[in-house]
Every structure is written in structure tokens, then in C-alpha cells.
Image (cartoon, rainbow, N blue to C red):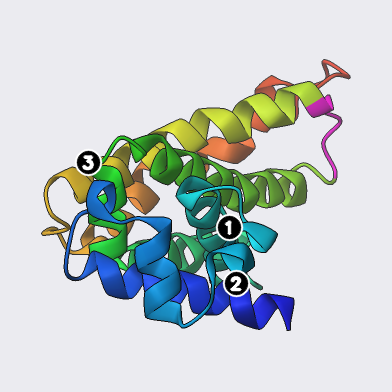
Amino acid sequence: MSQITKKALVASLKNLLLKKPLNKITINDITEDCGVNRMTFYYHFQDIYELIDWACEEDANKVLEGKKAYATWQEGFYNIFMEVSNNKPFVMNVYHSLSRENIENYLYKLTYQLLIDVVEEMAKDIPVREKDKCFIANFYKYSFVGLVLNWIKNDMQEDPEEIIKELTMLMQGNILNALENYRTDKTKQS
């Protein structure tokens, strides 16, 4: 029942964001739209920003399910674009409000989940320290998220498939090359 209530509160927030900006929405607005009392809201969340974080976390789990391998990273990244696009009023309102950091943190977490799994998969036969694998995943995470944030900033006009196509050409073999450069046994393979 708890998940149902949380999802209903998110749905109400998203509904309200179609009508007014985030900074004009109150907890009272959300609870009235949802048909619950304020105590129900506070039972689940401390404030609207925690509700936003939870909504982003839920979306993240669903977006990357089964799409975090080298063979499917492009599909996973495309799913990120589509999830952001499908929630455009929510994303744009949060992005243009004081809680833009929520969107950035959501994208960083989501993209890192995708990339660290790809790096781990590609490093299975290459001795590389965990710290170095995390560095590689973080490097690409910042690039990927920068592209998505620029896309959001430009009102999501560019075709995500074109962005991914260009990114694929740029990345061809680069993660594997980076892993080879970080080998701990110093006997780099040719």
C-alpha cells in the first residue's frame, strides 16, 4: 500500500506541474490533488524535494532494467532520453527551479549505473583496480550527463538517436582502451 500512495503523490505532483511551476506548488496542493491528508504525505516524505528524489529513483530503476551491458548501452542511454522526454513538464519544471540539482543527481546516478556495469563487463578479463574502473565510469558519466543537460537546456529539440549515433562513433573501443591503459599487471595486450 505504501508504494501505491507514493506513486499517487508523484502522479499528483506531475499533474500539478502541468498547470504551474514547482516553486508555486505546496504540499497542500499535492495532497488535495491526490485525495489524501497532509499527514499521509509526511508519513512518506519530508518535503517536496524528497518526493522528487523518490520519483527520479523509481524512474531510474525502470529505465535501465536489462540495459546495462556493452551490447545494450546505447539502448539504455536512449531509454534515459525517452524517460526524460516522456516526463518533460516534470523535468523542465524541476530543471528550471531551485532544485535543478535533483535532475542532475538523478542523471548522474542513472548514467553511472549504466556505465559501471559496462565497464565491469569489459574489465572481466583485465586486471584493473576498482578505483580505476570507477574513474573511467565517472569520466564517461560526466560526458553523457553533459549531453543530456544540454539537450534539456535546448528544450529537448535534438533527436536523441542522432546524439547516441555520434556518441557511439566517438566511444568506439574507448572504454576497452582505457581499461588496457589502467591494467595493474603492466603487461598490456596489443
Boundaries of the magenta span: 125-130
Amino acid on which the number 3 mark rests in the picture: Asn
Q: In which quarter of the image is residue 79?
A: bottom left
Q: Is residue 5 left or right of residue 88?
A: right
Q: Is residue 126 magenta?
A: yes
- Residue 138 image offset from top left, x and y in percent: 57, 30
Identify the mark nearer the N-term, 3 or 1. Answer: 1
> Viewed as shown, does residue 83 lie left or right of 93?
right
The residue singled out by tag 3 in the image is 150
The vertical placement of 155 against 150, above or below, is below
Amino acid at circle 2: Lys
Q: Looking at the rendering, in which quadrant would you find the C terminus?
A: top right
User: Are discs 2 and 1 less than 8 Å apart at CB?
Assistant: yes
Residue 34: horizontal and vertical position, in percent? 44, 79
User: Is residue 167 shown left or right of residue 65?
Assistant: left
Which residue corresponds to mark 2? 6
The residue carrying pointer 3 sits among few (fewer than 14), some (14 to 19) or many (20 or more) residues within 10 Å by Cα, namely: few
Q: What residue type is labelled 1?
A: Trp
Q: Pick the residue in front: 169 or 136.
A: 136
Sequence-wise first label, 3 or 2: 2
